[in-house]
Amino acid sequence: MEEGYFEGEDSPEDESDERRDLFRYVTADNAAEYLAVMDQFTQTLLTDLSAAEVSEALAKRGITLSPEDAETRCASLVRWKNLMPSARDPRVPTVAALRYTRARFQVTRLGGTVHRQVTKVLQMRDGAREVARELLGSMAALLSKILHQANHPRTIDAEALAADVTTVFTNQAYFADSIRDFYAYLSSVLVRYDLAGEEYASFKGLLLEYVHLIDTDVSRHSPAVLRCLEDLQPLLDHVLSALDSLPGLASADGAPVERLPGRQYNDWAELLAWYGGGDGGMSGPAQLRAAAESALGQLLTNARRMLTPGGTGGARRSELMHLAGLFAQASVEEAHRGFSAAFGAYPARHVSFGPDEVDPRDTASTSWWDSGPVDVPVSLRERGDRTARGRTARVPDPGMDIARLQEEAAQELAARQAAGAELAAAGALDGAHLHPAARDLLLELVSMALAKELSPSQAVRVVDVDLHVAVDVAESDTDSVIRSDDGDTTFLCLALNACAADADRPADAAGGSTADEHPDDVGMDRQPPSSAGDAQ
């Protein structure tokens, strides 16, 4: 089954869908074979071929396609309206000759038009196309002749008038197409960021000389063309009447016939609008001048980019090609090191901006996960330009930042003092309910106490002088459970008691010793004791 249709699928009924089907063979599977088959049907006029004849003709060109496959391709092209079955019923002398004539095909009008356009596109080059600028002067002369005949309707030579009208519209169509192709090429080159060196110099000459030549011819001839078209408007009835008097094509079934350009009022109105810019639109010559100015502006932008000391410089194509050669010859390990060195693929790190840093606590050792985002200048982010623009920025005033940091520190200290006051008022902690902040403070103090060696006969006191809170930790046969809003905390085989920092230490339950008997355990700060203190 060929691409584009499946069993049970209905044929397209909408006319626009049928027109789109004409292009299916260009992108379908086996597109090269479809193109070769269509070439056979469009080589001459009224080509009538069978699938076997198509297969033999392609074999002479070195393309192998069996008669069965050729018939399948032709059937698909018939389904897509590129071909149609031939209505001729040939007479054959033998049964063997019937296989060459039983199913014959010929190209449709739209199918032939599409294939000519496709062939033209496939054969076009990517380079520039010359503009048929010399046609403008010829159009001005032909329009003058048409105007002269229209002013004398009784002596009009209809054949000569038809030739001049057809030539004018054909020249206009060819000139407009060549202009569009040329400026499309300019656009494709101007958007290249690597345009530099000799290529830039040659393109600059093309743009400055050839575009100026086109603009000069358009400026010289377009006013004469526009003046003739405006003078012809009240005389178009004479022109069209003379053209209608010539023999023309009429459809047998009454279907409309596509007439040559210049035989209807709309054709002349569109031509006048192209040169005069009717209905408030921009005329063709004005569009050409605007496109030339835009191209020159882009050319100057590229030149400024290459000449700016702080810019990104010219093309890097040669350097990238050299780097690609190094990668091709390097081992896997060398390629990884070279990639990291060439493209800066190092671990992400935060770089301090000094006084401009929003939060001075973000340093080079701060993880980028935790630090705030860094604003990239617009010129660097959008244009890749590192050149400083505008006036020099003022030295930032750190007063507001200092005030903000002081306020944050005061709030943090107040929260810890409230947690210390709550913990100091709790007393015996087994079964006590503490807020999460007070519970976290208790964990800090207990961890400091456990840094000392506990014994059954001695409790350890840890004091936080700044928060005015102390915690006594002693071994016990039972566990201490601290309850909090976010869960319970269990201290295995520990007895905990909290009090104010200046409160007396209770007598040890096991040995009856007091803090006076162990002065080394009293008055500890939040920092864990040193190894020398432990030895004592």
Image (cartoon, rainbow, N blue to C red):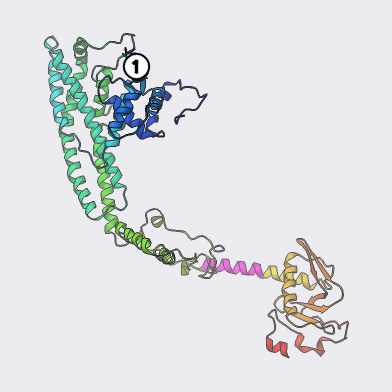
Can you identify the residue that label 1 sits on? 86
Q: Where residue 471 sits: x, y (%)?
A: 78, 77
Kind of residue sitting beneath label 1: Ser
Q: Is residue 110 left or right of residue 416?
A: left
Q: Is residue 400 left or right of residue 526?
A: left
Residue 100, placed above or below residue 154: below
Any part of residue 391 in sight: no
Residue 87, quarter of the rendered image: top left
Q: Measuring 75% from the left and 68% from the top, which residue is drawn there?
A: 439
Q: Is residue 397 left or right of residue 126?
A: right
Q: Nearer the viewer, residue 280 or 114?
A: 114
Any part of residue 48 in sight: yes
Residue 365, placed above or below residue 267: below
Q: Where residue 357 sits: x, y (%)?
A: 49, 66
Start and end of the magenta stretch? 399-412
Majority secondary structure of magenta residues:
helix
User: How many labels were placed on the picture?
Assistant: 1
Q: Where residue 240 sits: x, y (%)?
A: 21, 14
Q: Is residue 200 left or right of residue 532?
A: left
What crowding class fits label 1: few (fewer than 14 Cα within 10 Å), some (14-19), or many (20 or more)? Answer: some
Q: Measuring 80% from the left and 76% from the top, which residue is drawn there?
A: 499
Q: Nearer the viewer, residue 148 or 404?
A: 148
Residue 151 belongs to magenta span: no
Q: Where residue 66 sits: x, y (%)?
A: 37, 29
Location of the C terminus by quadrant is bottom right
